[in-house]
Amino acid sequence: MESSYDFLWIIATILISTKVLGLFSGKIHMPQVVGALVAGIILGPSVLGVISETGTPPNFLAVMSKIGVILLMFMAGVETDLTELKKTGVASFIIALVGVIAPLLGGYLTYVGFFGVGGGDFNEILKAVFVGVILTATSVSITVETLREMGKLKGKMGTAVLGAAIIDDVIGIIILTIITSFKDSNVQIGDIILKIVLYFALIVVIAFIVNIFASIINKNDHHRRTSIGSLAFCLILAYISEEYFGIADITGAYFAGLIICNLKIKEYVANRMAIASYMFFSPIFFASIGFDTNLNKLSSGIILFAIILMIIAIITKIIGCGLGAKLCRFSNKDSLSIGIGMVSRGEVALIVAQKGVEIGLLTSNLFPAVILVVIVTTLLTPILLKFILR
């Protein structure tokens, strides 16, 4: 008989399994986040199927997972070296731009070649472009955790990855809007671009206001109210970003951290947020990636398409972002590291793919293929980063 308290043992199972497999990953010289991701796959429907929303409050795991990724990106913003970010701003834009074009083209050609799409079928052409749009997505939450674990987050390379990921998100939104506008007449490209401009204007205004009151804020360093207020600020900006501007909530969370990173309170806030994040929310987020899919439903044809798409997804991001970094005079090793760091698709690609299913640009039988690409790229990114940065 199901109990309304089942969520307690579910949380306990997630926390213990992610920690145990995380420690095991550390023992074999891999980032601990890999163990947490594997734990989610094992516990989810693909293997054991012991974790589900049954017996839990509606959307409980999804909400906890969302808070987890928001906290991760907020902490990444707090720990960002703002001076270094200013130095890599142009580089981040170039990396993001080239890193969007290459996967977009690669995904389009993969769909067209695999399914034999003709030039006269406009609807299939749109679907092919949409597959490319999915591949443009970048989720750096896994990369952030890996770089932080290896002490590389605050360097030039880590800052470039974070900056490129933010810009990548904005470019992806614009492209997604253009494509969906062909299927939904209610979507206006001009309105979305205006919202993006207004959003960044709002961020600048908020940063300016915070800077005015910086001396007052810094006087409250090492007070619990400071960390509580900072967390509330993060959540509010994440909410405003998603709800009113159509910008990913994790982008708002990152900007919230970025605004705080130049204040004296940043060390105290980061330490306090780490407790809640690493003890509870982050393990649920990392494990939840494995809960959201059932790989057993993949047919042989879709598996082949998924494998090809996976290879294209990895190669195009590494080459695209790596080439962008090389154009900005990064070393060969840093260029390769940046390319690898942008490989993970994570929850961003899942959100885009789900949107495609809703509007008919992605068939339901192709959705598991996208999920497989997301899982593999998410697992592979920290492993490759660990290898190249060792």
Image (spheres, grey):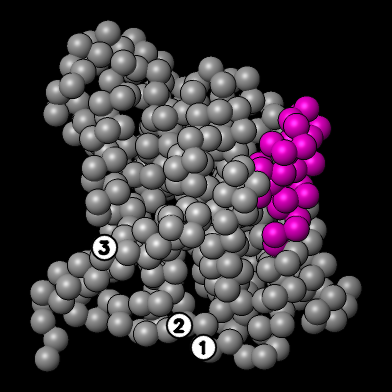
For the residue marked with disc 3, what is the amino acid? Leu
Q: Which residues are magenta?
A: 313-342
Residue at the spot 34% in from the left edge and 44% down from the top edge: 71
Q: Quadrant of residue 57?
A: bottom left
Secondary structure at numbered mark 2: loop
Q: Which is more foreground, mark 2 or mark 3?
A: 3
The answer to whether residue 254 shows anywhere in this view is no
164 left or right, relative to 375: right
**Earlier along the polypeptide chain: callout 2 or callout 3?**
3
Q: How many marks?
A: 3
Q: Amino acid at mark 1?
A: Asn
Q: Is residue 335 magenta?
A: yes
Position of 70 compared to 251: left or right?
Answer: left
User: Which residue is found at the position 42% from the left and 30% from the top?
Assistant: 79
First in residue order: circle 3 vs circle 1: 3
Distance (Cα) linking label 3 and label 1: 25 Å
**Do residues under tags 3 and 1 come within 8 Å of each other at their CB atoms?**
no
Quarter assignment of residue 157: top right
Q: How far is the residue under mark 2 from the one under mark 3?
A: 19 Å
**Residue carrying label 1:** 296
Label 3 crowding class (10 Å Cα cut-off): few <14, some 14-19, many 20+? many
1 or 2: tag closer to the N-terminus: 2
In the rendered image, which residue does mark 2 sit on?
Answer: 46
Residue 217's place in the image compared with 380, above or below, is above
Q: Nearer the viewer, residue 275 or 186?
A: 275
Q: Nearer the viewer, mark 3 or mark 1?
A: 3
Residue 85: image location, x then y, percent: 56, 24
Q: Which mark identifies residue 15?
A: 3
**Badge number at residue 185:** none
Cβ–Cβ below 8 Å for labels 1 and 2? yes
